[in-house]
Image: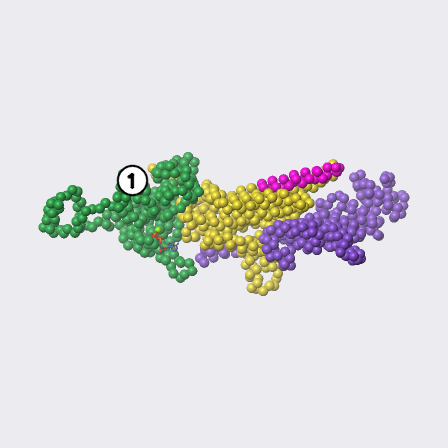
Chain colours: A yellow, B purple, C green
Amino acid sequence: MITTPPKHRAFSPWRIHAIASNALLELARLKVFYFLLLFALLIIGSSAFMMEFPFHEQFQVLKDLSLGAMSIFTWLLAVLATAMILPKDIEDRTLYTILAKPVPRVEYLLGKLLGVLWLLLLSTVLMSAMFALALATKEHLVVAQTMREMAHAPQEQLQAALRDVHEHAFTSSLVPGVLSIYLKAAIFASLTLLLSTFATSSIFTIIVSFVIYFIGHVQHIAREEWLGSAHPMAMKKVFLALVALLFPDLQLFNLVDDIVAGNAIQMALFVKTVGLGCAYTFVYAFVAYVIFAYKEL
Amino acid sequence: MKKVHLIALLIVLGFGAAKAPVEQRLTGEHRAAFFHGAKLSLDLRQQIGQMAFLAALSGFRSVVADLLFIQAHTAWEHVEWGRVALLLNQVTALEPRNVLYWDTAAWHMAWNASVAARYDKKEPREALRIKREREYFHVGADFAARGIQNNPDRYNLYERLGMIYRDKLGDHCKAADVFERGAHTVKAPDYEKRLAVYELAQCPGREREAYARFRELYESGEHERLPSVIKWLGILQEKLNIPASERLNLPPN
Amino acid sequence: MADSLVPAISIRNLTKVYPIPFKRERVVAVRNLSLHVEPGQVYGLLGPNGSGKSTTMKIILGLVSPTEGTTTIFGRDSSEVESREQVGFLPENPYFYKFLTGEETLFFYGKICGLRGAKLRERTRELLALVGLEGARDRRLGGYSKGMLQRIGLAQALVQEPRLLVLDEPTAGVDPAGSREIRDLILNFKTRGITVMLCSHLLEQVQEICDRIGILHQGKLVREGRLEELISIENQTELILENASPDLLRQIGALVSGSDAKLIAQHQPQRTLERFFLEVTGKEK
Ligand SMILES: Nc1ncnc2c1ncn2[C@@H]1O[C@H](COP(=O)(O)OP(=O)(O)OP(=O)(O)O)[C@@H](O)[C@H]1O
Ligand SMILES: [Mg+2]
């Protein structure tokens, strides 16, 4: 009856996959996320039907509202999902049953994080699809209106007008915008996971995560003051340095505002920004592992 | 705090020390590419309120700007020009890279608010009404000029400012300069340089320069030989007394 | 194999001190504990609440790190992940993922043990049959009773065919019939050569299945040894007679009083409450 089991692998993608898909399933069963998602989709969908402005502004408002909604909901999803996922396993003692198997803690943590990232990816794709649909609908409406209004204009002018409409609808620079939204959420998933490895309750994790979100958006002010000016008082300088060292600069991942306003980001710059985001995600996950590895369960 | 927490903190700080200069450099590169140019000052906070300011700080600048813009739109429908100007000021402060906002603001001030001031039934003294009208021209020009400062790479606002000088303030020399600068932006449409030259032709003392530019245009090919170009060439040849031998052989219009 | 010489569990000078957050006090959960469990044995760890049984088990499984001392499973230190290949664990009052069915639960635990494909399905089927949950395979664990949870917990512990089982109160909250079934399962494991360490407050059951016991009190091992040796009273003999006439009893009494022996008690034996309960609920086989 007793057979020798397959040799133990120090690192197994298969085990991580099992834990990640289980985490995804667990998260996908929480109703609160459907509310969030539904709400986001509603905002995105409804912004397609604001008609009282000139069409340039209609596109503008549609993009701003949609991307704003995507940004806040993806981030919320990241924080809420990650904040509950570890404490729940600890509370229900399912963690004991998993770690009592030959599963390294790093795999367990990585699996959970990947589960969240996977969930974020799915919801980002869903919201992007809704956004694309809203944008296409709007474009369709505006084109129809333009055709009606310019029915008697020369063909050449009509074509120019329609080209103008297309240029204001979908632009390829929206893609890095959406990616930056996902990236920010990924950083927060990792950061929240780190917080939850030593937090005593989910609510603590969530609150601290929110605070970091706000400070992260003004971190650059502290950093520029710290690195830029030569002579502030020592105390002040230490304080500024601490803010700059401890918090991420989230403004760097905040590209959508300016992208919608008409800025395109060059590939090289975008790649650097993504690199920094990945570094954050990795380092936070690594520190989470260091703490978790020594955690008394 | 346990030892491992201290180690964790040290790792975060160590990473912080490594990433701070990277962030600093990246911020510089972002700014050079015209990202994060908004100036979220305390002054703005007072104007738009604590909540909106917080939202704007935490990544929802454009949404706040949109909401203010919609308010401006409503104020416009209610013909409250002072409020429109104030709100558009806030909108442009939040979204300085949005040409549309600057352009709308400049247009509202120079074309709509000015007209409303000129024909204000509550103000019987005409001299005052004219003064108010001109003030609004300048407010419009100011929006366009500030917009250009924030968006030197986009032609739209040069065009708007040029039109204000040309059509509202009647300053052809300034209009010519502004159009000219617009024509040098990357995505400027072809007509931008013609706009500049037309104005140059009407700027006292620079007619000769304008004539040279028109010739250049004319000689650059068939596609530039528009009726208005030809017309201006004719006018300038007369006005400048160009010797017959040097004159272009213009087709009759 | 040299394996038979290596103890299934070996605990050497184990001490565990829990700090109490925000206070200067500390709790000593386990105090200088040493014991060995030989392969093939069923070992019972007994003790009152808070005596350190669960803590000891968690240390064996590497869930909690010892303050001092070491524990090994088949010779591998508990701090190594590999030591967990040969052990299945059922924690006290386990909860599993409520949204999974019985079958999915075993799939999940199988996968994290590296099983997959046909082998995983086969193993799952086998285990569901073993613990008698075939009928509930497609029901979500959220709807399982306490006893069913305990059984799926056992199945989960067995998924990678470990040579050692560590069971923390496997019968807590389970009705007598269920608890007998679990007892029978454990005896079944023993016949298959699986080593078991368990702790339980049902001493009667411990008595029925354990080869060896250790008693913890306030984190210290106060007694340890083979069960019979520990509980037999060597200078007493029990006679149980059926249909004995009063006359016979009188004769025996006379014989006793004429000897060196002393009659300490004479009474009608009672059936145990457990047996009575099983008789009335009709579950006695
Ligand atoms: N995580 C912990 N932090 C602090 N003290 C703990 C922790 N876990 C257990 N203890 C303490 O250690 C001692 C032993 O606990 P343990 O759970 O091992 O006892 P037990 O024998 O399993 O008890 P029970 O029969 O009630 O299950 C108790 O005094 C308990 O309060
Ligand atoms: Mg216990």
Helix, strand or loop under label 1: loop
Q: Amino acid at mark 1?
A: Lys
Is residue C103 rendered to the left or right of residue C32? Answer: right
Q: Identify the subunit bearing mark 1.
A: C
* Camera-side residue of B92 and B35: B92
Q: Position of residue B218 (x, y in %)?
A: 81, 42
Residue at image location 50% in from the left, 48% down from the top: A81
| Residue A151 sits inside the magenta stretch | yes
Residues in magenta, as a range: A129-154
Is residue C254 rendered to the left or right of residue A80? Answer: left
* Camera-side residue of C237 and C252: C252
Give the main secondary structure of the magenta stretch: helix
Residue at image location 69% in from the left, 50% down from the top: B77
Crowding near the residue tagged with mark 1, few <14, some 14–19, many ≥20 C-alpha atoms within 10 Å: few
Quadrant in the picture for the N terminus of chain B: bottom left
Report the number of discs. 1
Residue at image location 78% in from the left, 51% down from the top: B168
Q: Could one spot residue B220 in this view of the protein?
A: yes
> What residue is pinned by disc 1?
C283
Quarter of image, res A241? bottom right
Q: Position of residue A190 (x, y in %)?
A: 51, 49
Q: Could one spot residue A275 in this view of the protein?
A: no
Q: Position of residue A100 (x, y in %)?
A: 39, 46
